[in-house]
Image (spheres, rainbow, N blue to C red):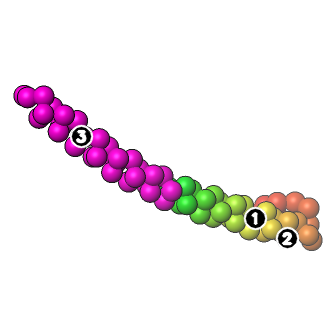
Amino acid sequence: MTDQELKDLVASLAVSQAKTDAQMAKTDAKIEKIAKMVGGISNNQGDITEEYFINSLKDKLTLGE
């Protein structure tokens, strides 16, 4: 392999790496957005469950009877 071929190869690898870095940044942003959505769903389910049990204990302070 000549010096020029080696230089061309390294240059093409640098370009490919830059493209990969840009794609990874987009992927990271999408994953972060999904994580926030899933976290919001979990919090919402917790709120609903808490409200259900609070309401079920209004008349009688026991569970399962």
The residue under label 2 is: 55
Pointer 1 local density, CA inside 10 Å: few below 14, some 14–19, many at least 20: few
Q: In the rendered structure, are the residues bearing label 2 and label 3 in contact, judged by CB atoms less than 8 Å apart?
A: no
x%, y% of residue 3? 13, 28
Residue lying at 44% horizontally and 57% vertically, measured from the top left:
26
Q: Which of marks 2 and 3 is in front?
A: 3
- Mark 2–mark 1 Cα distance, whole angstroms, equals 12 Å
Left or right: residue 57 versus residue 27 is right
Q: Earlier in the sequence, mark 3 or mark 1?
A: 3
Q: Which amino acid does label 3 sit on?
A: Ala
- 9 drawn magenta: yes
Asked if 60 appears above or below 14 in the picture, the reply is: below
- 2 drawn magenta: yes
Quadrant housing residue 13: top left
Left or right: residue 20 versus residue 34 is left
The residue under label 1 is: 47
